[in-house]
Amino acid sequence: MSNHQPIPEDDAGQDAWLETLIVDPANSNNPLLPALQLLCRRDREHKKRLNRLLRISDGYYALARAETDSLLKHSNQQIRRLEKISRISDRYQQSLLEWNEQLRRAALRDPLTGLANRRMMIERIEEEQERARRRHTDFTLAMLDVDYFKQINDTYGHELGDRVLCSIADAINSNLRNYDLGARWGGEEFMILLPHTGLTEARDICARVQKALAGVKLAQTGQTLNITASIGLTPYRGQEEYTQTIDRADKALLRAKREGRDRIEVA
């Protein structure tokens, strides 16, 4: 077949070049012409099939891409919802923890004076008892009762009486060490726990508390009330139960009241 043009490098140019060869009258009698025509037809059919496959493939790809984008969008929405739920859950759990801590503190504090209540005091005494048994340490208990507190209520009324009771609690607490514990035991009766403390030092602390109580004033008038207190003092003994220690402090307190009040009795 005669055509002296150089063969193009691109597909479109090669197709045009082959078409030129086929329609060239000079090649009409060339025995290879039918074969070339057959190959060209097959090539066109192959290209049509390939284009059709490409279109189908592109369609599937677009569909898959759309589904993937939809899944990603849905997944991102779910992740954002879960993150929001997680944040809400974290805040809720934190609120629960804070609320539980407030409840725990409230359960261990006297609502009027803010001192430890009987439950908290007993828990601390149990801890000191276990520590004393393991390490052979000392602790001392003091039971304190405000003398003639009923007269304060009768004179000033229960509302002012409660304020005086709070001032008494402050006077007791402010004269204890950081590791001591003062608690409202009931009414105008208080318990003082003095860890790692012998009787001599415990007596000095109780005397300091008595002196502070004598200076408590009526908030409305600034009048000094000259409050006195009877105190029963006792150390923890060996391997006894803490209830025995409390009972002994209570008996010492009763003895202090029988002996004229405003005094410290040691059991």
Image (spheres, rainbow, N blue to C red):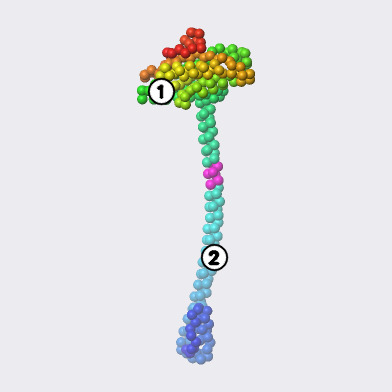
Residue 196 has which mark? 1
Say above or below: 21 vs 141: below
Say above or below: 72 vs 141: below
Q: Nearer the viewer, residue 151 or 63?
A: 151
Q: Amino acid at mark 2?
A: Gly
Asked if the magenta segment contains residue 87, the reply would be yes
Q: Is residue 246 visible?
A: no
Which residue: 52% across, 41% down?
90
Q: Position of residue 44 (x, y in %)?
A: 51, 78
Q: Position of residue 193 (x, y in %)?
A: 45, 21
Of badges 2 and 1, the one in the foreground is 1
The local secondary structure at tag 1 comes to: loop
Direction from residue 212 to residue 137 in the image, left or right: left
Residue occupying the far top of the picture: 259
Direction from residue 130 to residue 225 in the image, left or right: right
Name the magenta segment's main secondary structure. helix
Asked if the magenta segment contains residue 213, the reply would be no
Task: Say how many tags the image has.
Answer: 2
Direction from residue 132 to residue 174 in the image, left or right: right
| Mark 1 surroundings: few (<14), some (14-19) or many (≥20) residues within 10 A | some
Q: Which residues are magenta?
A: 82-89
